[in-house]
Amino acid sequence: MNMRITGRVAGVAAGLALAVLSSAAQARDLAFAVFPPAASPTVQKIYQPWVDWFNEQTKDDDVQITLYAGGTLGRNPMAQAQMVKDGVADLALTVPSYTPGVFPDYDIFELPGFASNTREGSLAALEMHQEGLLRGYEDYFVVAMYSSGAYMIHTKDPVATVADLDGKRIRVAGQIQTAVIEALGGVPQSMGAGEMAENIDRGLIDGAMTDASVARTFRVTDVAHNHYDANLGVLVFTIIMNRGVYDSLDDHAKQVLAESGQYIADRQATFYGEAIAKNLAQWEESETDTLVIPSDADRAVIADRVQPVIEMVKAKASPGLIDAYVAKLEDIRSR
């Protein structure tokens, strides 16, 4: 009798073990493509921790996410959404401004003088998307939306006032940055983030327009030691998922994805914001770097010069969107 019971228990145990192994073998592995290098702060502090958090939350479901950094699945930042549509990746990091004219509502975030830091930009973008105020990405499920820090101009030669930008060749990304640099008297030069430092070092451009963290990640600050901190807008990022893949997930996995936007925005504001603050503090104390905060008079000049850019964006965006953006920023600052 004991032998029969023992044999039956052993059989049940073996069956359970096979079932667990079968379930593990059938678990879906979703590919998440990002183009920043694996060692960058956003990968280390934002993307990988989110993937780990998601996988922990869904460990009893049939899905997990694997991160592919550094453009492993495709290096072109402008092709990431198409990669998701084509099934090369299940999720991907995208930048709306990299495809001009496709996402006109997102241009508002790149306007100078509005969002002044990562927290403001990230929460404004996420909440305005959740409230249905932003057109675009209807063919995808948007997992997260967040922003960079405020754009600065990093140059090899000193820039003490906006007048010093006249004729300077400045790297830009996208049509709004192009329009802003032109309005400020500079000569926009379009190129990838990985090309900035080399081109500054070789004297082919005079500087780059980007935030403090990106400038360090892509080694711009190795060759450009002058930093003009003029609050020139933020860059919005989105993490999107193939709509068919999202629809095929169970309800619990979808719920975790619904919570992911706030999780990522909060980490971006905390850790990315801290990285920017650290860089600014170092430059302020450095004997080799110069950090310039424009005077009120200089800010007034900047505001006057970029007003036509604001009007251009306003004309293409959804009606009332800039007013809604201003109201959202005021709300965020009051919290």
Image (cartoon, rainbow, N blue to C red):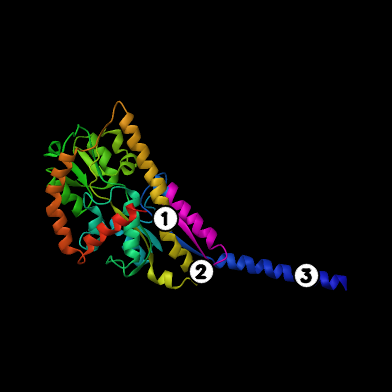
Checking the image for residue 213, the label placed there is none
Give coordinates of residue 66: x percent, y percent: 47, 57
Q: Amino acid at mark 2?
A: His
Give coordinates of residue 203: x percent, y percent: 19, 35
Nearer to me, 284 or 211: 284
Q: Residue furthest front?
A: 334
Magenta span includes 111: no
Which of discs 1 and 3 lies nearer the camera? The answer is: 1
Q: Amino acid at mark 3?
A: Val
Magenta span includes 51: yes
What residue is disc 3 on?
A: 9
Quadrant location of the N terminus in the rendered image: bottom right
User: How far apart, in angstroms, are the residues tagged by discs 3 and 2?
Assistant: 32 Å
Marks 3 and 1: in contact by CB < 8 Å? no
Nearer to me, 54 or 7: 54
Neighbourhood count class around disc 3 (C-alpha, 10 Å): few under 14, some 14–19, many 20 upward: few
**First in sequence: mark 1 or mark 3?**
3
In the image, taking residue 231 as reference, residue 88 lies left or right, namely: right
Question: Residue at point 39% right, 42% down?
Answer: 274
| Stretch in magenta | 44-69
What residue is disc 1 on?
A: 264
Above/below status of 1 relative to 230: below
Give coordinates of residue 222: x percent, y percent: 30, 33
